[in-house]
Amino acid sequence: MVHQEQHLGERAYAEDWWTAGEHQPRLVTAFSMDAPTETQFDLPVQKRSAKDAVKALDSAKKWSSKITGLMMAGHGMLAYVSRDGLGSGPNLSCTVLYLSLLFMVAEGRPIGEKFNLLLDNTSGTLIPNPLS
């Protein structure tokens, strides 16, 4: 019960920022960044090794790119595809944020006096703690 109340409170808080970003873009810029997990792209694969060893996909690498989406209140969404070898986590999130801000400036769109960034599932690779 407590978790649900906190979750709904956080959602209402985020929706308030989003609404302000849509209706008052010179005052508020609201972004929401999300990245799907690798398993969300898995397609069901029939085991074919018993029938045809050449067509077997059971052990093939499933996904080698990362997708990160950034929704911008009142403006739309940008999708970024990056090579898996570049990694993910804070560096990728900051790069997506930087490129999106550059896009807004290039398009002549206002960046508000207040900025709200909601991050969801964007820390795919954590940076090791040097103190541990």
Image: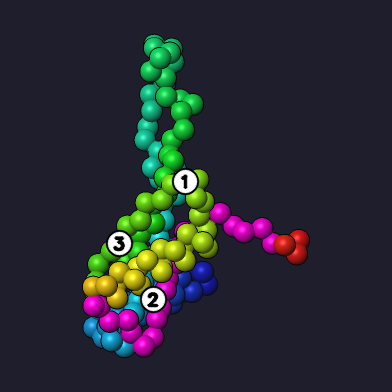
* Left/right of residue 108 with respect to residue 29 in the rendered view: left
Q: Earlier in the sequence, mark 2 or mark 1?
A: 2
Question: Residue beneath label 2, please?
Answer: 14
Residue 63 drawn above or below residue 9? above
Mark 3 neighbour density, 10 Å: few (under 14) some (14–19) many (20 or more): some
Q: Secondary structure at mark 1?
A: helix
Kindly identify the amino acid type of the residue bearing the numbered disc 1: Asp
Where does residue 111 sit, x and y in percent of width and height?
32, 81
Where does residue 97 sit, x and y in percent of width and height?
41, 68
Q: In the image, which is nearer the foreground, mark 2 or mark 1?
A: 1
* Left/right of residue 26 with respect to residue 39 in the rendered view: left
Residue 19 appears in view: no
Task: Indicate yes or no whether the magenta region holds residue 117.
Answer: yes
Q: In the image, which is nearer the foreground, mark 3 or mark 2?
A: 3
| Residue 106 occupies quadrant | bottom left
Question: Residue beneath label 3, please?
Answer: 78
Q: Secondary structure at mark 2?
A: helix
Magenta residues, as a range? 108-129
Q: Pointers 3 and 2 in contact (CB under 8 A)?
A: no
Mark 1 neighbour density, 10 Å: few (under 14) some (14–19) many (20 or more): few
Residue shown at the point (32%, 57%) measured from the top left: 79
Kindly identify the amino acid type of the residue bearing the numbered disc 2: Ala
Residue 72 drawn above or below residue 19? above
Question: Residue beneath label 1, please?
Answer: 84
Residue 108 appears in view: yes
Residue 99 drawn above or below residue 27? above
Where does residue 78 sit, x and y in percent of width and height?
30, 61
